[in-house]
Amino acid sequence: MESTHELREYLPVWCDELKIELQDNTQGKLRRRQPAIASRLSSHFPDIETVLQYAKPYSSASTSSSIHASRWALRNINTSKLVKLCENAFSWGTATGIAKKFIRVIWSGMLFRTLLQVRSYCSLRSQLLIYILVDSSGDI
C-alpha cells in the first residue's frame, strides 16, 4: 500500500474476506467456523487510524531530523549496572535467583551483541587492510 487512500479502499474488501473466512473456514485454518464473530464485525473494521498507528508508527525518529541511525553506536555493556537494574526493577529474588534469571533471560542477547561487535570490528579491519594494500601498490 502506497497511500492512505489505497488503504481506505482495501480495508472494506479485506474485512469482507475476513467475514467469509470466519463464517465458512474455507482455508481450514480455524478449528471451527465462527459465524457469530463474523456477524459482529462492523463494515468499518478495522479502524483506519488504528491500522495506520501500526503501519506507520509515530516516533521521535519520524518527527526529528536530529536522530540519525548513522549516529548510533554500540557501547560496552555495563554488566554491573544491568544486574543492579534487574535487581531493583524486577522481583527476581535472591542473588542466586537473579544470577539464574540473568543467565536465562539476558545472557544470550549480550552474547549476540558481542558477536556483532566482533563481526563489525573484523569487517572494519578487513576494509582497512584492503585499503592499505591498494594504496601502497596501486592494485591488489
Image: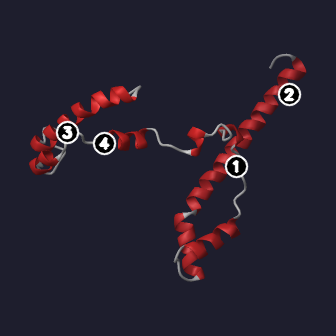
Badge 3 crowding class, 10 Å Cα cut-off, few under 14, some 14 to 19, many 20 or more, is: few
**Disc 1 to disc 4, how far (Cα)?**
39 Å
For image coordinates 60% across by 52% down, the residue present is 112
Give the colour scheme shown: secondary structure
Mark 4 falls on what kind of element? loop
Q: Which mark is residue 74?
A: 1
The reply, left or right, for residue 25 in relation to residue 84 is: left
Circle 2 sits on which residue?
132
Quadrant the C terminus occupies: top right
Which amino acid type corresponds to the residue marked 4 in the rendered image?
A: Asp
- Residue located beneath label 4 in the image: 47
How far from the left and from the top, in percent, is residue 46? 28, 42
How many other residues sit within 10 Å of disc 1, few (<14), some (14-19) or many (≥20)? Answer: few
Crowding at mark 4 (Cα within 10 Å: few <14, some 14-19, many 20+): few
Disc 3 element? loop
130 or 32: nearer the viewer: 32
Asked whether, in this view, residue 109 is left or right of residue 77, the answer is: left
Q: Earlier in the sequence, mark 1 or mark 4?
A: 4
Task: State which mark lies toward you, 4 or 2.
Answer: 4
